[in-house]
Image (tube, rainbow, N blue to C red):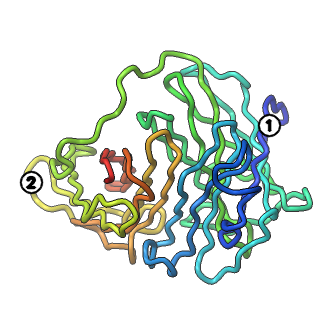
């Protein structure tokens, strides 16, 4: 049930992909509330063919406001002012380790509740919660109240600023991504995340050795991400991965400062292993953390890699 005790509100206006040139205001470099956004229509730019990727460029949302969305093939662009999201956090000033209640209310351009949503990758909403230093990551699926709002509880384990990325799809419209911020009191990380020295060196997760091959780290160029899975006990290739959210898995890529966001799904399902392939683009040079999520033996597991795009 959606909670009524809402302590903090951040209204977030979302722009349609084809309205990016005009911007939500005066465009890149404008004052607070005017955001530089990179949006794309899947199947038109070559970076997300066949896998429904969500791509956002630099998100200048330090004040809790954000703009980003992706138009999917087969759906027209929405009115730039057609969707707003109100964020509510309880408690208003959360502490590390305590439960945070997050409520999101969706409204159209006239301020009326959006009541119908389409399922995307088996869920009505995907909520990504990541700490600004990229050390903490959660992928959640908020509960819908049947009217216009979504509710989710989350426990944020350490202090610092967290970014929230909510992917959802109003019925018959383009898919949207709303973003917001919440600051958590408590001990913050003192050591920044560094790139992996060798991403081909396997990481052991859920009884598997998982390695990652990247075709190029050149920003702005299409790149292939190939995960490979082997049994940690005997080194044999694994081909019994189970579908997760309708595919072999999916990948979230977030840039330094949690301002660049890509939510990428596997091309054509990708079967059950021993490899899973994804295509995307790093929007600009810099540090990126890549979280691959997969399922085996009924358990979802997450494996992170950190790289620096050139």
Residue under the image location 64 percent in, 58 percent down:
68
Tags 1 and 2 touching, CB below 8 Å: no
Q: Earlier in the sequence, mark 1 or mark 2?
A: 1
10 Å crowding of disc 2: few (<14), some (14-19), many (20+): few
Q: Is residue 63 above or below residue 60?
A: above
Closest to the observer: 118 or 258?
258
Residue bearing the label numbered 2: 235
From the viewer's perspective, is 135 left or right of 307? right
Q: Is residue 194 above or below residue 299?
A: above
Residue under the image location 14 percent in, 62 percent down:
237
Closest to the observer: 127 or 285?
285
Q: Residue furthest top?
A: 187
**Mark 1: secondary structure:** strand
Task: Place residue 27 in its image quadrant.
Answer: bottom right
Q: Does residue 11 appear in this view?
A: yes
Q: Position of residue 46 (x, y in %)?
A: 43, 78
The numbered mark at residue 102 is none
Residue bearing the label numbered 1: 9
Mark 1 vs mark 2, CA separation in Å: 51 Å
Residue under the image location 49 percent in, 59 percent down:
263
From the viewer's perspective, is 178 left or right of 242? right
**Mark 2: secondary structure:** loop
Q: Position of residue 73 (x, y in %)?
A: 58, 80
Residue under the image location 43 percent in, 61 percent down:
244
From the viewer's perspective, is 267 left or right of 201? right
Q: From the viewer's perspective, is the residue at label 1 or at label 2 nearer?
A: 1
10 Å crowding of disc 1: few (<14), some (14-19), many (20+): some
């Amino acid at each position: 049930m959606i909670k009524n005790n809402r302590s903090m509100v951040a209204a977030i206006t979302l722009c349609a992909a084809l309205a990016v040139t005009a911007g939500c205001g005066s465009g890149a470099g404008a004052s607070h509330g005017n955001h530089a956004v990179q949006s794309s229509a899947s199947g038109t730019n070559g970076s997300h063919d066949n896998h429904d990727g969500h791509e956002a460029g630099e998100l200048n949302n330090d004040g809790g406001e954000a703009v980003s969305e992706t138009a999917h093939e087969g759906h027209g662009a929405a009115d730039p002012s057609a969707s707003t999201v109100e964020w509510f956090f309880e408690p208003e000033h959360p502490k590390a380790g305590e439960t945070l209640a997050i409520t999101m209310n969706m409204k159209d351009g006239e301020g009326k509740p959006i009541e119908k949503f389409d399922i995307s990758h088996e869920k009505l909403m995907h909520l990504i919660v990541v700490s600004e230093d990229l050390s903490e990551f959660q992928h959640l699926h908020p509960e819908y109240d049947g009217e216009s709002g979504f509710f989710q509880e989350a426990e944020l384990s350490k202090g610092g600023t967290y970014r929230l990325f909510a992917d959802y799809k109003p019925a018959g419209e383009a898919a949207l991504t709303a973003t917001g911020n919440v600051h958590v009191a408590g001990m913050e990380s003192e050591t920044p995340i560094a790139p992996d020295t060798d991403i081909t060196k396997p990481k052991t997760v859920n009884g598997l050795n998982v390695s990652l091959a990247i075709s190029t780290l050149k920003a702005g160029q299409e790149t292939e991400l190939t995960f490979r899975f082997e049994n940690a006990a005997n080194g044999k290739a694994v081909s019994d991965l189970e579908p997760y959210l309708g595919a072999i898995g999916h990948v979230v890529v977030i840039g330094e400062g949690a301002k660049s966001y890509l939510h990428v799904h596997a091309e054509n399902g990708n079967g059950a292993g021993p490899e899973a392939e994804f295509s995307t683009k790093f929007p600009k040079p810099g540090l990126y953390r890549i979280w691959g999520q997969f399922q085996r033996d009924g358990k979802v597991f997450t494996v992170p890699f950190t790289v620096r795009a050139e």
